[in-house]
Amino acid sequence: MGSGIGQAVGGSFSETHWSSFHYLNLYRFVLAALLFVASVGVAPENSFFLAEFSRLHISVSAFYLLATGVAVMPLHRYRQHFNLQLSAYILLDIGVFTALMYAGGGARSGFGALLLVSLAGAGLVGQGRLVLFYAAVATIAVLGAEVFWALRSAFEQAAFMQAGLLSIGFFATAISARLLAKRILANEELARQRGIALANQTLVSQRVIEEMQDGVLLVSQDARVLQHNPRAERMLGLRAVADGPLSTYSSELAESFGAWQSGGAAEPEPFEIAASGLTLRARFVVTESSDGAVLVFLEDMGRVQERAQQLKLAALGRLTANIAHEIRNPLSAISHAGELLLEERREETQERLVRIVRDNTLRLDRIVRDVLELGQRDRVHREPIDVVAFLSVFLEEFCVKEKLDGKIIRTEIADAGRIRFDRSHLHQVLWNILGNALRHSRGEPGSVILRVFRGGNANSPALEIHVIDDGEGVADDLREHIFEPFFTTHSRGTGLGLYIARELCEANRARLELLGNAPGAHFCIKGEVIGDSQS
């Protein structure tokens, strides 16, 4: 026997088969009840059965009601041997309706139509060639009953013609119902597969939106948020907010949305969110949905600038790698030649020119060395550093190499703890900042203050390292340029020290800030504190 479309692996049947089979049994039970009522509740003169077969049709209809009741109530939960159960019930229908047809006077009684319904139901829920077997059995039963009726009474040619046409109807009904069932099951399977694919796609899309680095909101035309991803909540400084008016999310975003609806640009000017401290840029895209909902993409401008900075540093790294060899070798040759010229006896003017060449050669070499240090930004190995122990060793080395009186730098260390930083990076950052402070200080004892303490807040604790000098400070018109590369106010400076220090701090998830003059330049490093100081 051929397998049906809805059949599951291993010979079991789908839920659709068993549900359809259950509804077929319910129909048979209702029909049996109606036939039993018609048999016992109608007077013999009004019955559509022949009076001489009253006992037959009553007993047959009673037996049919009992059998269908058993099939509906206790056995519909028994989900094994599907074909065997279906065959037993259809053969029972054929026997019952043939007996009732005989009790009603043959094919002209009309019970053949009930057989058509049973065969149609078998074709819809059954499988393969079994439906043809049911039609063949029904044909044999109907023709046999008609022959028995003809032998018992007079032969009627019209009755046999009607029985033959009814038999043809059996096969036509069974085949048509089976073809219809195959198409229905095929469509159901296709719908099921598409439903699974849609559910999987929905889950994937939902996960992608949740993991996006940009905030996403779906907003209706009347400025109500229909959906949003968790990233949007974090960017707007919210926590577990329910969908509602856009103004409850952010008044700045609501104003940008209103301006865009009035004909403004698709990407309005960036705006700052006070709750999160981020500067965001919104982009509005109209969807093709029936309600005209709008997708709002929120982009962190800080991340955009960080990516641009990374691209700039990558390009700078490639450039420095290419020019390092080409520049340093000629510089070494020039420096060596200058030293040889200084050893010869020259006039004062020639000696001065040679010193100029040598000094500028050293300055160029220092610039190249500083630029090459930017390549260390991408090689970060953050580790817990005990600040007290680190500063003790660092200050001793710094004073020795700079030939500095240790009293010039005054340290003020409070509850410091440990900071998570790359050790070589922290060394370079402090060296650059302290060197800058010394150049602009008075050079007296206590002219440079190195102050360390815990700062931040309960949610975001930080360890702060402050470097303050007693110089003239930073002029207001120079403050915004102080961290720009190659910007310097010192005649022998390269203009890269503070720029490199800030880049290395950002690589270690720290910040280097220029605070107000106190009274001289005041720099602050804010890094991640991870615990108490350990000796």
Image (tube, helix red, strand yellow):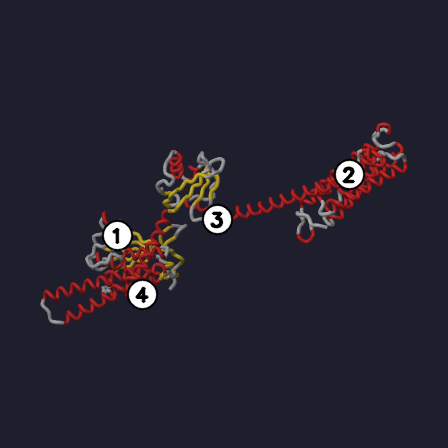
Q: Mark 2 or mark 1, which is nearer the start of the sequence?
A: 2
Q: Mark 3 packing: few (<14 Cα in 10 Å), some, or many (20+)?
A: few
Determine which quarter of the picture holds residue 530: bottom left
Residue 115's disc is 2
Q: Amino acid at mark 2?
A: Leu
Label 1, label 2: how far apart the Cα atoms are: 97 Å
* Element marked by disc 1: loop
Q: Amino acid at mark 3?
A: Val
Q: Amino acid at mark 4?
A: Val
Residue 208's disc is 3
Q: Mark 2 or mark 3, which is nearer the start of the sequence?
A: 2
Q: Nearer the viewer, mark 3 or mark 2?
A: 2
Label 3, label 4: how far apart the Cα atoms are: 49 Å
Q: Mark 4 or mark 3, which is nearer the start of the sequence?
A: 3
Label 4, label 2: how far apart the Cα atoms are: 102 Å
Residue beneath disc 1: 482
Residue 393's disc is 4
* Element marked by disc 4: helix
Q: Mark 2 or mark 4, which is nearer the start of the sequence?
A: 2
Query: Left or right: where does residue 204 sit relative to residue 15?
Result: left
Label 3, label 2: how far apart the Cα atoms are: 57 Å
Q: Nearer the viewer, mark 3 or mark 4?
A: 3
**Image coords of residue 139 (percent x, y):** 80, 41
